[in-house]
Image (cartoon, rainbow, N blue to C red):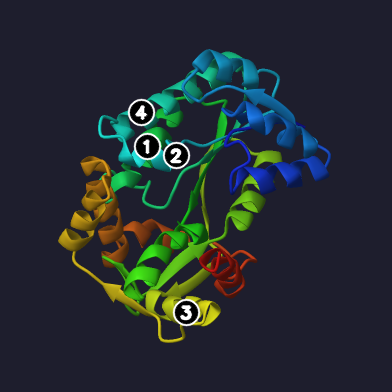
């Protein structure tokens, strides 16, 4: 198959590209970074250099593809752009994808959405996934779409390294003994690859998770891996988290959106639809990821 994927060689797109190429598919990888071209080609894929903000470029890159994988991002630097309307900017990317899919004639789409995209309330920053899902839902009915909804990414745990080193704890506005699902990008890539090549008509949602564990258990697991067996997960207030984020220079709307998103994790609202459609768990468990976390922690 001819498949075009977005996301350059990121945490999901790189293993996705490897798997698809190894299985004999002709893969084109979209990247905004010209320096990535040689790395993309080294994997056996074709490189298309351009941006998600350029609908004409996307149309040209999608043309001739039998399936496309689309995802949206502003990158972490966007969180600190004081003038950026991140929800509006990502909705614009969603509209660019819609236009490119229609004009290129692609009939099979796999979209990286998120847990929390089932609602427009109480999901904070994840509202942009709800918005983009609804934009893509307006595509013609002969365009088949799988909306991938992964849970919390393992590598997001790396964001706690600073507070572990400076305060000796993991601190955020969710936690405790309630079980929460987490996912490895490797398992997401495997699920996306399966959806891209499996014949399907219509629209469907697929949740992706690798492991389920409480935050307190997770703190013990990570603590053991980094040589801090007494590591604790401390739940702070929404206000404390918001003030901490604002003190780093984060865009106030982004910070408020992240606080609301985390609160939805704490009260369980984000997981309501996940548990109604609970998936088979993937292969990469948190005990394995803890070694990777420790390697980054000790750098």
> Which is more foreground, mark 1 or mark 4?
1
> Pointer 4: what residue?
89
Q: Which numbered circle lies on residue 78?
A: 1
Residue 87 image point, x, y percent = 31, 34
> Pointer 2: what residue?
75
Distance CA(mark 4)–CA(mark 3): 38 Å
Q: Is residue 139 left or right of residue 177?
A: right
Secondary structure type for disc 1: helix
Residue at (52% x, 26% y) in the render: 141
Question: Closest to the observer: 293 or 167?
Answer: 167
Mark toward the start of the polypeptide (4 vs 3): 4
For disc 4, the neighbor class at 10 Å (few under 14, some 14 to 19, many from 20) is some
Mark toward the start of the polypeptide (1 vs 3): 1
Distance CA(mark 4)–CA(mark 2): 12 Å
Distance CA(mark 1)–CA(mark 4): 10 Å
Mark yes or no: residue 276 visible: no
Quarter of the figure with residue 23: top right
Q: Is residue 109 above or below residue 223?
A: above
Task: Kindly check if marks 1 and 4 are in contact, taking CB atoms under 8 A apart as contact.
Answer: yes
Mark toward the start of the polypeptide (4 vs 2): 2
Mark toward the start of the polypeptide (1 vs 4): 1
> Pointer 3: what residue?
223
Question: Closest to the observer: 135 or 87?
Answer: 87
Residue 57 image point, x, y percent = 57, 16
Secondary structure type for disc 4: helix
> Which is more foreground, mark 4 or mark 2?
2
Residue most toward the left?
A: 239
Residue at (26% x, 29% y) in the render: 83
For disc 1, the neighbor class at 10 Å (few under 14, some 14 to 19, many from 20) is some
Task: Kindly check if marks 4 and 2 are in contact, taking CB atoms under 8 A apart as contact.
Answer: no
Residue at (29% x, 31% y) in the render: 84
Residue 229 image point, x, y percent = 46, 86
């Amino acid at each position: 198959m001819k498949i075009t994927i977005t996301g350059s060689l990121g945490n999901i797109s790189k293993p996705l590209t490897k798997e698809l190429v190894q299985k004999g598919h002709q893969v084109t990888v979209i990247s905004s970074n010209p320096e990535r071209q040689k790395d993309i080609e080294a994997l056996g894929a074709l490189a298309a250099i351009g941006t998600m903000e350029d609908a004409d470029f996307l149309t040209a890159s999608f043309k001739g593809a039998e399936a496309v994988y689309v995802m949206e991002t502003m990158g972490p630097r966007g969180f600190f752009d004081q003038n950026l309307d991140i929800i509006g900017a990502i909705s614009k990317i969603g509209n660019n994808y819609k236009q490119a899919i229609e004009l290129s004639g692609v009939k099979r789409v796999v979209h990286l959405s998120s847990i929390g995209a089932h609602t427009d309330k109480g999901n904070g920053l994840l509202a942009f996934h709800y918005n983009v899902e609804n934009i893509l839902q307006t595509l013609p009915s002969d365009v088949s779409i799988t909306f991938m909804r992964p849970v919390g990414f393992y590598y997001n745990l790396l964001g706690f390294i600073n507070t572990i080193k400076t305060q000796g704890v993991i601190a955020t506005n969710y936690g405790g003994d309630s079980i929460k699902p987490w996912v490895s990008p490797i398992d997401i890539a495997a699920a996306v690859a399966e959806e891209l090549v499996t014949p399907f008509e219509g629209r469907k949602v697929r949740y992706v998770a690798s492991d389920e564990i409480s935050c307190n258990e997770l703190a013990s697991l990570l603590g053991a891996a980094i040589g801090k067996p007494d590591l604790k997960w401390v739940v702070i207030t929404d206000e404390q988290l918001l003030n901490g984020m604002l003190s780093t220079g984060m865009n106030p709307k982004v910070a408020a959106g992240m606080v609301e998103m985390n609160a939805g994790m704490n009260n369980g609202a984000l997981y309501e639809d996940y548990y109604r459609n609970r998936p088979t768990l993937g292969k990469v468990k948190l005990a394995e990821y803890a070694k990777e976390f420790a390697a980054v922690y000790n750098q």
